[in-house]
Image: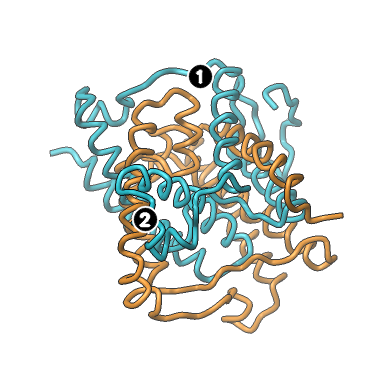
Amino acid sequence: MFPLKGTDALLLAPVFGFAFGWLLQRGRVANYDTIVNQMRLRDFTVLKIIMTALVVGGLGVLVLTDSGLATWAIRDTNLLAAIIGGALFGVGMVLYGYCPGTGIAAIGSGSLHALVGAGGMIVGAIAYAFSYDWMAANVLSVWKLGKVTFADLTGLPLLPLYLVLAVVSIALFVWLERREAR
Amino acid sequence: MSDMALPAGASGGLALRRMSGRATPYLVGIGIGVLSWVVFVVVAAPLGITTAGSRLAGGVAALAVGPEVVAANSYFARYPVKLDYGTLFLVGTFFGGLASSLMNGTFKLESVPPVWRERFGGSVARRFAVAFLGGALAMFGARLASGCTSGNTISQGLQLAVGGWTFTAALFAAGVPTALLLFRRR
């Protein structure tokens, strides 16, 4: 029965997107101040959401793939592209004050500057498309690791790695909450 | 979701307080994690936004420079304009933000946000210009890395993929100094 394909999947896409946008808005991250203040290390809402999602999402997907209900969907690691892309993204995110997902949810919340920035995102995507051949030859081709996880890198099984992530996240949360309570 | 009653002290002492129509970050993180389970199982499509962005960009580019130029571009050829799962998901994200903000009363037309205004003043033109530039840089970087915070940080990250985590590390390594510099007081 699962995964659904074709029209069934298309009908569900906006439903899942709606849930995502709803969650982002409820989490206060469809919000310039929250995101910029995270990057200024003054507000850790973004980090709390991300780490919780990674632990919960990750452990769940591990169980689901183990039981055959889901399959892994790991992308190629092109390490140089990930580094440069991530860095450009980080700078862009500070200037925009949103990431693409939160930006779109923010447009829904009335943010006109998020809308203007979305225009910028279109231009950025066009610029990338026209730079793609060069990128493919000079950046994407460097340090191509394939579909690697930290399990592959360390030789450890996945479960202990997820548990390490969970422990580190919880320790981080406890530290943040104590700090913020002062 | 706005009326979920939460047990205080759940989850090992961390209080999951509900704040009138907003949800604590931990609850939202759990929600995104659970949503990830659902999309992995039901549609085998991890959360992601920017692939749809590339498709939409191809559509815009076709209007600007003509469909032949777009068709000749190897990247747009890989991501032709179509109303596919990712595009519909993106549209749904907009409506989710809209509905949530209307329901919790936080919908507000905003041109200049408070943190920006405090540092850079109230000029709408200045804010719009920087937002536009930021959006362009962010999307360029995201497509280079084949994903943004949704596609890479969350979807690849939760699978412990090296590329996803590298993207996130680079994002913070560049973004934090940028933010600290940008908002530094003279």
Q: Colour of chain B?
A: cyan
Q: Colour of chain A?
A: orange
| Amino acid type shown at disc 1 | Thr
Q: Label for residue B106?
A: 1
As displayed, is residue A50 above or below residue B3? below
Q: Where is residue A95 shown, x and y percent of the image? A: 29, 43
Q: Colour scheme in the image? A: by chain
Chain ID of residue with mark 2? B
| Amino acid type shown at disc 2 | Glu
Categorize mark 2 by other alpha carbons within 10 Å: few (<14), some (14-19), many (20+).
few
Q: Is residue B132 left or right of residue B160?
A: left
Q: Where is residue B164 shown, x and y percent of the image? A: 51, 64
Q: Is residue A119 left or right of residue B33?
A: left
Taking the view exactly as shown, the residue that stands out farthest to the front is: B68
Write down the residue under mark 2. B68
Q: Closer to us: mark 2 or mark 1?
A: 2
Q: Can residue A53 be seen in the rendering of this structure?
A: yes
Which quadrant of the view contains residue B5? Answer: top right
As displayed, is residue B155 above or below residue A182? below
Residue at 64% x, 55% y is B46
